[in-house]
Amino acid sequence: MDQEREFRRIAALIGAGDEPGAYRAAEGVIASHGDDPFVLVKCAALLYTMERWERGEELASMARRAAPDDAEGRLGLAVALRGLGDHQGSVELLAAAAGAEGQVIELARSFAAASRPEEALRTLDGAEGHEAGLLRAECLSRMERHQEAIGLAESLQDGSFRSGAVLLESLLRAGRERQARSVAESYAKRKRDADGLALKCYVMRIKGKTMAAMNSANQALKLDGSHTGALWNLALCLLEKGRTQEAKLLAGAINDSDPGSPLAMDVLRAARS
């Protein structure tokens, strides 16, 4: 069986509204490859899209039990589980993946995703690089050390959606909504690219200006149809409008563009609530 072709077929069935057929096809993949933890994770993500939450969680547990022995394999599976929202499982696997390249950063990400910013910050002690700095800023913001977070985030701006989103989140958590909007609009005016427009969308959505946010997201997607930040924000806007099925399809598009992205699960969990 060509796994990737089968996964594309399942996604197409979901998109066409044939969820019973998609579920049967997913169970067929599980029956054939149930000993592969990465296949189990992919199937779990598809089942979450179909709102088969209990079965998806069962597959995530199966994937943890089938974790690879090597540190690199555990690292990859930990990242995938974090994308499913299994933060504790991700932390446990990463703790056992000591020595793997990127282990420190990924462990910090999992602690942060699990709402454990203090532990994430301790994990980053001594870590260098741009992403380590952005993670520190996120943790400081969540710990309400707003001035430190904003100052660090400002120093790390490189024009990307990622760095801009960290700064905007820090400003918004500090209650500086007017400044956040001004920053986002300056990005959009200066860059006129997908990153800038997606950042503008982000602030418009937080401000409750859903139609303006959707307009910015659609403009971003015209420039880059797979921009995960724009897809994520547009999906959340669609949920606010009650357009749940369309939002879930965008979650699938996020997962296609960035497999294992926690943004896809963020949309699906929001759709569930």
Image (cartoon, rainbow, N blue to C red):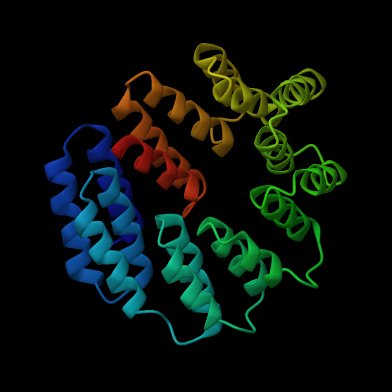
Percent across and percent down for residue 207 are 58, 20
Work out which residue is located at the far right of the displayed protein and give it.
Answer: 155
| Labels in figure, total | 0
Front-most of residues 115 and 47: 115
Image height of 197 relative to 56, above or below: above
Residue 223 appears in the rendering: no
Q: Position of residue 191 (x, y in %)?
A: 79, 25
Q: Is residue 104 left or right of residue 250?
A: right
**Quadrant showing the C terminus:** top left
Q: Residue 75 in the image: x percent, y percent? A: 53, 73
Seen in the image, is 267 located left or right of residue 7? right
Q: Position of residue 208 (x, y in %)?
A: 53, 18
The image quadrant that residue 242 belongs to is: top left
Which residue is situated farthest in the bottom direction here?
Answer: 69
Hey, which quadrant is residue 184 in on the image? top right
Residue at x-position 28% and y-position 34%: 15
Q: Is residue 166 above or below residue 260?
A: above
Q: Residue visible at 50% across and 16% down?
A: 210
Residue 124, placed above or below residue 244: below
The residue drawn where x is 41% and y is 47% is 265
- Residue 171 in view here: yes
Quarter of the image containing the N terminus? Answer: bottom left
